[in-house]
Every structure is written in structure tokens, then in C-alpha cells.
Image (cartoon, rainbow, N blue to C red):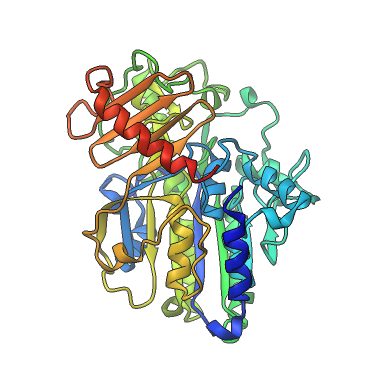
Amino acid sequence: MFRNALWIVVFTCLGYSTSVHGQGPNVVLICVDDLRPELNCFGKDYIHSPNIDALAERGMRFRRHFVQAPTCGASRYAMLTGLYGPAGNHALFDRAKRLDRDAVDVPPSMPKWFRNNGYTTVSVGKVSHHPGGRGGPDWDDSAIPEMPGDWDRHLLPAGPWQHPRGAMHGLANGEIRKNAKNMDLFQSTEGDDSIYPDGLIVEESLSQLDRLAASSDTKPFFLAVGIIRPHLPFGAPAKYMQHYRDAELPTTPHPEKPAGKTTWHGSGEFMKYNRWGKTPNTDHEFALEVRRHYAACVSYADAQVGRVTQRLAKHGLTENTIIVLWGDHGWHLGEHAIWGKHALFEESLHSPMIISYPGMPQAGKSTDAMVETLDLFPTLCDLANLPAPEYVDGQSLQPILESPNETGHPAVAYTSKAKTIRTDKYRLIVHRGGETELYNHESPDGETSNIAAANQTIVSTLKKQLNARLQVAK
């Protein structure tokens, strides 16, 4: 399915001998759920994000990073495997079933590749789709691993939220989502970071980091930390809301529902929560409250990032650790009258990525090179001086890290009903029924004016590129 003969030959010839490659740098991968490029260091000066901003000063910001899918599970599949894949949230569980049937048919994931090359691999929080990486009714059944054999430890401290499913949508002090209509869309509660699930996730991450640091002189580590906020519901300690109580937020661009055939949807994930009878598309003040609470969650997530980077520094590991901050997809805050992800518009697919590594020549710079999530796997291998996995669909970003003016490459994404390719100038969306959307990003109209009917030659050219890219995964 995935050029199996080639990767098996590569796997065998390389032998995965840690003695050949020696001691490599550590890797810390920080995954943040539903994070738009809504950060000070990405030009949003109304956002309080000092810790991520500090990381950006030591690294490179990828200002045009696009994910493979506007939903958690499929996007994380691409990040963790380096492959285009299924469009649904159970993509990694389906991969686990294939592994169980015939492991030879499934190439190693990124954590497995690092583990086989001598790294201790640890995941805490939401790194794969289910926090803690297990299935079952409460996502805590060890007999149903999401990524079998890939992590030395795959953890989720549930605390008062009882289990990973409870933590995923947990509000303050152990409140669990049972029926979403009875759970508030947002809240801001007095207390320290531990009153929401991410506080416990990062506390466990710090404990794991302490443990890994103790043996890092003899064995490098790959630590993945998955922060849940700003995923719905938008709950964060009240101290983070203080930054936004009186904040002036910019006007939401193109807030109208688009006409014609698009991937617009009715924001079902958002609308099912208790909204006190209000709808943000018709209630301007309520829309601002939603945006302020989203921003507070971003600042809460930023504080958790700071706890991890500060603990790295305390152990003296900053100068021997690659750090990546990655948003698993974007999130509409009213653009196109959507409150959520799951569309193929820019807002759903555009997320922040920052890469920092010791001795990088362009520290503090940003790049407008277009890149994709699945580029991360080969990039980390290059930076860690590991053999390159030949079977992945992405390409290493090391040339861009060394020269931010490099051009990058078009970005591809998909849902179960449509697929898209984004180039410097255009976005083409092709629906399952054959309908097309074409948007010109050099026009002020952007993704509000479908110009496909008048530009069929461009549509045909981009469709061929899109199909050729996705054919790789067949």
C-alpha cells in the first residue's frame, strides 16, 4: 500500500543500530489542540503569549504551515506517520488494526522510528487522537492501544476527571461532559492551573522530563506533550481571562455564510454546548465573549508551554534539545459564519508551527515558505542526524530552517467529502461530486469569491497536481 517493499529494504539495510548514529539531541514536541495562529509572535498583538513568543525568538516561525486535515485524529495521523491518510478521527486506531493483522504492511511511525534508533519515547496528554492513546468507552482500555509499540510510556493523568474521556472535555474541578447541552460553552474559574486538565497533563510531563533528564547523558529522549486547550469547551483559570476583559479585538473578517457549494457547516460541535440561548453569528457581544474566552485558553496553553521549556532549562537541556510547537489545525472564530474546524477554508487548515534547535543559524526569524504537517517527521530526523525514512510523503524543512527565503511547496488537505491544494496564489477545493471552488489569495476577495467557472484551465492544472500528490498514498 505505501511502497512497502521500499521501506522494508530501507528498514533492513539501516539496521536501526544506535551505535552507528551515536548520541543525538533530545526532542520535545508540544502539540496544542485547535490552536489558530492566534499568538503575539504571529502578529496578533492582543494575545498574551509570552512563553511561545520566547520560543519563537529561539526558533523559526512557519507563518504558512498547513495541516493535512481539519480534524484532530486525521491531522495527528499525518504528523505522527509522515503520510497522507484517512480523513477521520479513528485513523490511528485503524492503523493499529492493520498492524495487528500484518505489521510488515505498516511503516514505522515517527515515535517508533526514534525509539528504534535508540530514543526513549514518552507521550503525555493529547498527542494522538485520544489523550493517553487508548480506546474503550472511557478511552482507558490498555488492550486497545492507539499506537501499539510506539511509545515507551503513553500517559494521561485524569485526576478528578476520572478517565481520559472525562479529561478531554473537562471543565473546572473535575466537571465531565455527559450531555453537552448541560455543559457551559465557556467559563473562567478562580484557581491555579491544576483546576483544568492541562495543569495535570503538564505536571506529569514535568515529572517525566525529570526522569528522562536523569538518563539523557546516555540515552536521548523524544517527549511529546499534548495540551488540550483551546479545545472546546473554552475553560481556563480566571487569571488568564484578565488579559482580555477589556481587550479590543479586531473585527472578524468575512463573517457571512458563503454562497454556493462549499465545505461550510453549521458548527455542530460548538452549537451543542449550553450557549444560554445565544448565537454568535447574530449576537455581536456574545461573539466577542466567545473570542475572549478562546484567547484566555490560548494564554493558559501558553503558560503550560512555559512550564515545559523552563524545566528543560532548569536541567540544562535547552542546548541539546530540539523543540517543536505544533497546532493540530486551525479554528474558525466566526469567519465564513463558522465556529469550529472541519471545513477546508484557510482558517481550518492554517495553524502555527515553531521549530527551535541548538545552534540554528536563523534563530528568531520567520518564514513565509509554504509547508505541511507531514514535513515534520523527515525534518526531525535530519535535525537529529537519524537516517531519513524514505517512505514518508513529506520533505525535510532543514533547507528552509537554514534559509528562510526558500519557497516551500503546495499544501494538500482533505475531509471525507472534499480535498484541497493550496499554492502561493490559489486554493482549489474539489468536492466528491466533482464541484470545484477556486480562490485567488492575491485578490482582496480571498476565499469569499469562487472564480472556478471563469478559470477552468487553472482548475484543471491544480486538480492534476492535487491528484498526483494524493496518489502517493494509494
Query: Does the image show residue 309?
Result: no
Q: Quadrant of residue 167?
A: top right
Q: Quadrant of residue 354?
A: bottom left
Asked if 68 appears above or below 391 in the picture, the reply is above
Asked if 279 appears above or below 121 in the picture, the reply is above
Asked if 279 appears above or below 74 in the picture, the reply is above
Asked if 286 appears above or below 222 in the picture, the reply is above
The C terminus: image quadrant = top right
For image coordinates 67% across by 63% down, the residue present is: 151
For image coordinates 61% across by 68% down, the residue present is: 11
For image coordinates 67% across by 47% down, the residue present is: 95
Viewer-closest of 158 and 5: 5
Residue 120 placement (x, y as % from top left)? 63, 72
Residue 257 placement (x, y as % from top left)? 36, 17
Q: Is residue 233 left or right of residue 39?
A: right
Query: Does the image show residue 216?
Result: yes
Residue lying furthest left in this view? 443
Residue 64 placement (x, y as % from top left)? 31, 47
